Amino acid sequence: MTEVARGPVQVMGEVLSNKRAGGYQHLTLVAPGVAERFRPGNLVALAVGGPLSDRLLRRSFPIYRARATGAYRATVELVFAVTEPGQEWLAGLPNGASVDVVGPLGRPYALPKEPVACTLVGNGHAAAPLFSLADRLRERGCAVHMVLAAPSERELFGALDAKRAAKTVVVTTEDGSIGLPGGVGVVLPDLLARTGSDVVYAAGPAPMLHAVAAAAESHGAWSQTTLDTDLVCASGACLTCVVPTVGEDGVSRTVRSCLEGPVFRGDRVRWADIATVPADTWGTDHSGGAE
Amino acid sequence: MSGPDLTTTIGEVQLASPVMVAAGCAGTGRELEPFLDLGQVGGLVTRSVTLDPRSGEAPPRAVETPAGVLSDTGLQGPGLQGFLATELPWLAQRRVRTVVSIAGQNLGEWAELARRVGLSPGVTAVEVNLAWPPDSAAARDSYQAAKILAAVRRDMPRGIPVLAKVAPLVHSVVDVSRAAVEAGADAIVVGHGLPGMALDRATLRPALRGGNGFLSGPALNAVALRCVWEVHAALPEVDLVGSGGVRTGFDALAMLAAGARAVQVGSVVLHDPAAPRRIAAELAEELDRRCIPAVAEAVGRAQRPHPDLTGDA
């Protein structure tokens, strides 16, 4: 929280490697300037389709890993599911191809000042940013525990990584095809109690984050959550990726996921009202515009 | 190399460059600062300021469409007071040429917005958003547009030009523009996004929560260009600003040659936050290549008989 953001840069990145990783795509880009400024939780936004592209909107992804120095200069790695033509274009890029990169964007995870126990909860490929977070936490002497969740085994990401990154690894799938059945809401309360975690970090879809925030709250831990959502410009200019939150003053506001987030304090998000503008939000009038 | 003279005038205000950033595409300005020297852009049009704070439309608010973006934010914003307290001073401090877009719901609101914006330091011009509320006909209806422009002009200091932003609809754009100018507008901006719809791939339901949105981006460029042409042909003495899908220096030049004195770039900024700088540089090259020494000499040039516009010189 006390760290000063040094702001994003726009650079022409170069594909260093681009390969399948389970059901996902793992893209490594040489992106000088981005990796140096990276903090876990930050995003990058990529232009798709090349210079003649008619696809206007950037595709944004949380950074999986960043290396500021290395054999290939500064690199950032991304993991994503290929679900639409822009992502297909990215997934098909050969090594050496150019990609316009903007980043790092967004508010990163707040790190604890003390070496406390932390539990990291990720769903599918959305778990990607938690691995560099785990490294930073371990550097600070924090005990790191991890929950990897997915609808089924096919969508699970990072199980091997997690064994290196965390003291405890719990895998849970909704269909029980691997690990414990039932999902995050079922396994998390027990893990928090067992590990005495003071902070819970989570990345995934809103229902999972809702469960995480609730479990953290009843355990008495802080939660830091990253909502897995589409961002249009990722720089804050377009005002479209809004999330209903409650401020310290108790007033509800719609805030941008890309700028005020993507990391939010779990107890500040109105999880039950995601994708709406609740009627008591600041600035909701009676002439339409809100639900 | 000195390059062509890019200065242009809108109303009585001189701009260092004809490339402006369109309303709703620059955030508060702060969002673009890492990518762009805002002092260098011809002008930054703010998102439309409403009298009261607005929480806006429920998401999803924007979706990509062929060569465009369909969006409706519901004009989320801090309201006039919040804007004047937190957003305008930041822009003024950096000497950004700020065009304040205003959006009222009735004549009383328009007048109050005009009066209070007009009294605030750091305002280069005011742009009247005639397309809001979405059910308003003002962007395409001469009578309503004239009433609004008269109310705004009456309460605006003389030195601050009032720009009327009209819908790029060929059947009415000349009439609405003429009415707006007669009611006191100093310049016309052509134009708004057009109402549109997109369906979600997975659900086959409207992709935007609000159902309809406004289409902007390159998909609109030819439509906007024709409207600029028509208005310039009918009202050659009126200052025009062309807005609609400009994303290259040539697109900007085409708007100028059709009759605009400046252009606004919008959706392309969401794609490339540094686009205004690139487009201005490309425009300078385009002018240079055609031996046109100044933006002022390009304005309306496509509508005048002239032997040498090929760029081979």
Image (spheres, coloured by chain):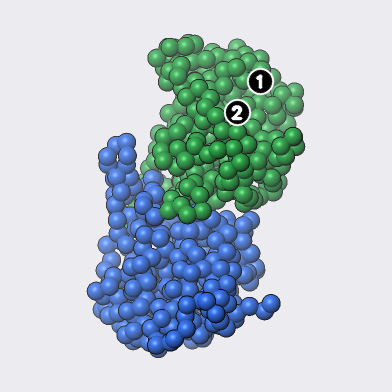
Q: Colour of chain A?
A: green
Q: Nearer the viewer, residue B166 or A100?
A: A100
Q: Answer with the quarter of the image where residue B173 lies.
A: bottom left
User: Which numbered disc, 1 or 2, marks the residue that appears first in the sequence?
Assistant: 2
Say above or below: B42 vs A255.
Answer: below
Question: How far apart are labels 1 and 2 at the CA level?
Answer: 9 Å
Label 2 neighbourhood size at 10 Å, few (<14), some (14-19), many (20+)? many
Label 1 neighbourhood size at 10 Å, few (<14), some (14-19), many (20+)? many
* Residue positioned 61% across, 61% down in the render: B36
The residue identified by callout 2 is A130
The residue identified by callout 1 is A165
Q: Is residue A68 visible?
A: no
Quadrant where the N terminus of chain B is found in the figure: bottom right
| Extreme-front residue of the structure | B312
Q: Position of residue B192 (x, y in %)?
A: 37, 66
* Residue positioned 30% across, 48% down in the render: B198
Q: Position of residue A165 (x, y in %)?
A: 66, 20
Q: Does the CB distance between marks 1 and 2 fall below 8 Å? A: yes
Q: Nearer the viewer, residue B166 or A193?
A: B166
Quadrant where the C terminus of chain B is found in the figure: bottom right
As shown in the figure, which amino acid type bears the numbered disc 2? Leu
* Residue positioned 52% across, 27% down in the render: A20
Chain with colour blue in the figure: B
* Residue positioned 33% across, 45% down in the render: B207
Disc 1 is placed on an element classified as helix
Say above or below: B162 vs A163.
Answer: below
Q: Position of residue A187 (x, y in %)?
A: 50, 15
Q: Nearer the viewer, residue B12 or B88?
A: B12
The chain containing the residue under callout 1 comes to A
Disc 2 is placed on an element classified as helix
